[in-house]
Image: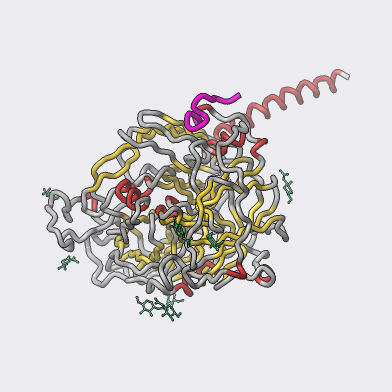
Amino acid sequence: MVNSLMQRVNFVTLCALCFLISLLVSTVEARVRHYRWEVNYEYKSPDCFKKLTMTINGKSPGPTILAQQGDTIVVEVKNSLPTENTAIHWHGIRQIGTPWSDGAEGVSQCPILPGDTFIYKFVVDKAGTFLYHAHYGMQREAGLFGSILVAVPDGESEPFIYDHEHNILLNDWYHKSTLDQAEGLSSIPFVFVGEPQSLLINGRGKFNCSSSSISITEEVCNTSNPQCSPYILSVTPRKTYRLRISSLTSLSALSFQIEGHNLTVVEADGHYVEPFVVENLYVYSGETYSVLLTASQDPSRNYWISTNVVARKPSTPLGLAILNYSPNSPKKMPPTIPPPGPVWNDTASALAQSLAIKARHGFIRTPPPKADRVIVLLNTQNKVDGYTRWSLNNVSLALPLTPYLVALKYKLPHAFDQTPTPENYDSADYDIYSVPKNVNATSSSGIYRLDFNSTVDVILQNANTLTPNNSESHPWHLHGHNFWVIGFGDGKFDIENDPKKYNLVNPIMKNTVPLYPYGWTAIRFQADNPGVWIFHCHIETHFYMGMAVVFEEGVDMVGDLPSSVMGCGQTKAFHGP
Ligand SMILES: *[C@@H]1O[C@H](CO)[C@@H](O)[C@H](O)[C@H]1NC(C)=O
Ligand SMILES: *[C@@H]1O[C@H](CO)[C@@H](O)[C@H](O)[C@H]1NC(C)=O
Ligand SMILES: *[C@@H]1O[C@H](CO)[C@@H](O)[C@H](O)[C@H]1NC(C)=O
Ligand SMILES: *[C@@H]1O[C@H](CO)[C@@H](O)[C@H](O)[C@H]1NC(C)=O
Ligand SMILES: *[C@@H]1O[C@H](CO)[C@@H](O)[C@H](O)[C@H]1NC(C)=O
Ligand SMILES: *[C@@H]1O[C@H](CO)[C@@H](O)[C@H](O)[C@H]1NC(C)=O
Ligand SMILES: *[C@@H]1O[C@H](CO)[C@@H](O)[C@H](O)[C@H]1NC(C)=O
Ligand SMILES: *[C@@H]1O[C@H](CO)[C@@H](O)[C@H](O)[C@H]1NC(C)=O
Ligand SMILES: [Cu+2]
């Protein structure tokens, strides 16, 4: 009797102790990481040419967020841009339970006004390589972006071995201001800025200051400026390195290569890849990869790292960095000509890479065998009231003044177009290889409402642009989800036969996937994340010209919205229930 009572007391004490310990352990494991960021304009010379650049705490690319799976990230963003709004999106983070922290202006929040501070708070629930960037106007292109690197939890390890890791963020760079470019895109006649001046590797490139027809002073373009000295990747012979390679280009699709070295692909968009070896890696805007590099070559010299434009006829020089074998001097130039990369229009080898990316054995999540709903989106360039736009099934997205999340959660009437968006286009009658006879489309703020937890297939169908014999590639990015990449094809999608060829065995999950010229790409996802999520082309100008759709799912299950996401459109005088 006494004994058993004693035992009970002991048990209770023990349990209280367990609880305390588990609390302590969980606070150690799942940390809260707090950041204070100030967004500003500063003159920078990332490619030696002085340009007004958007910075975070004085830097572009901004600070790297280093975290561990399960951590909570809190970022206080102070908008110190004197005359512009802003918003920051956390690219690849699903925002489960925090759809108001997605940072998509017009979708999940009102813009952050000049002088205001907005607090983003979310959990990084998955290890991998992710990004962040402005999601307001075309500000990403002005330099407002950076990386989020999430490590596996303590006690877990990656399914591949390496000695060290390095982060490599690629982007393209224009000398003309973003505002200037945006005005051109929304003018009649349409004014396109053309190809970028430089490609940057970790924010560094080299513009040839004497190549311009107008003479530029050294005050404006100075090739000796330390800001544009090349990025140096230092390695020790025989060691293996994990390189996290991602792209946030505004326009260009890229190939990345290291002279004399092959790369083994092991991660894509935060998912483990069944390893395969490439001589060059194709990277589309919004994609992230990890590759393994072994320093196995002659260590007495240095090697070129290069990136080149693919998928559009390039007029941008290579972006260059240096692979430095210790103990050589990092300044020792490689004795060779930098690798030019693959020819720009070798779509077949880019597609072959997409097809080679499969989920790694032991990490496969198989998709549901069937979709509840199939949405086919024809990608076209059109005219809307004389303006050049991009459309899906003849509808070009015009973001409403009131963010969708607030409008749907609080049932605000007339906040956006209630006309349902089209599920398909008249495929029998449409020639994807020519410029349509009637190029007119419409613009709308209508959305796709998905049944909660239903399985949705989206087939992206490419077509000819407004230019004869031209079809462009588009990297499509989905917020709030990872999707399975289940198929690619050439020409027009055949709804009867092509689904039979889907890969439902080991498809990779991604958040960004390319659509190739005159081809189609099929993805599948589960609508299991309550919120409102934008799905858009990651080319900055295309998104700006309406190349996006919006999905709503389970919005009734979303918790009370913070009043900080409101204050615009119909939410001016509305601050929640
Ligand atoms: C820079 O451009 C000038 C003029 O086109 C050319 O003569 C020169 O060789 C170029 N320099 C480099 C390093 O490419
Ligand atoms: C160009 O850059 C070098 C190195 O920073 C500097 O010494 C020189 O003064 C700069 N020239 C001008 C005109 O600013
Ligand atoms: C890289 O891969 C190619 C094709 O598989 C092969 O021919 C080449 O020898 C490899 N190079 C190195 C440095 O391993
Ligand atoms: C690729 O483009 C070049 C011109 O840049 C052209 O000569 C060649 O025929 C093209 N190849 C293909 C496969 O279209
Ligand atoms: C397309 O729309 C414009 C007005 O924006 C109109 O002038 C033109 O006639 C339309 N084209 C056709 C083929 O209907
Ligand atoms: C787009 O709208 C135009 C004008 O109404 C029409 O002629 C054309 O067939 C439509 N295209 C598609 C793909 O629905
Ligand atoms: C969603 O559906 C899957 C089966 O497709 C099921 O396993 C899961 O429990 C469902 N989740 C919710 C939140 O209903
Ligand atoms: C477009 O390609 C077709 C054949 O594919 C050719 O007959 C036609 O001349 C080309 N048109 C232009 C403008 O290049
Ligand atoms: Cu696009």
Residue 241: percent from the left, percent from the top? 42, 59
Magenta span: helix, strand or loop, mainly? loop
Q: In this view, does 326 lie to the left or right of 501?
A: left
Which image quadrant: the C terminus? top right
Q: Is residue 192 magenta?
A: no
Q: Quadrant of residue 553?
A: top right
Which image quadrant: the N terminus? top right
Residue 435: percent from the left, percent from the top? 46, 69
Please tell me which residue lies in front, 420 or 450: 420
Please tell me which residue lies in front, 307 or 315: 315
Q: In this rendering, is residue 533 above or below 110?
A: below
Q: Which residue sits furthest top?
A: 2
Q: In this rendering, is residue 384 above or below 427?
A: above
Tell me what residue is drawn at x 23 percent, y 49 percent.
45
| Colouring scheme applied when the structure was drawn | secondary structure
Res. 303 visible in picture:
no
Q: Is residue 308 left or right of residue 498?
A: left
Tell me what residue is drawn at x 67 percent, y 65 percent.
505
Count of number-bearing discs: 0
Q: In this rendering, is residue 109 above or below 133?
A: above
Tell me what residue is drawn at x 32 percent, y 62 percent.
323
Please tell me which residue lies in front, 376 or 101: 376
Residue 50: percent from the left, percent from the top? 21, 49
Q: Which residue sits furthest right?
A: 1
* Range shown magenta: 565-577
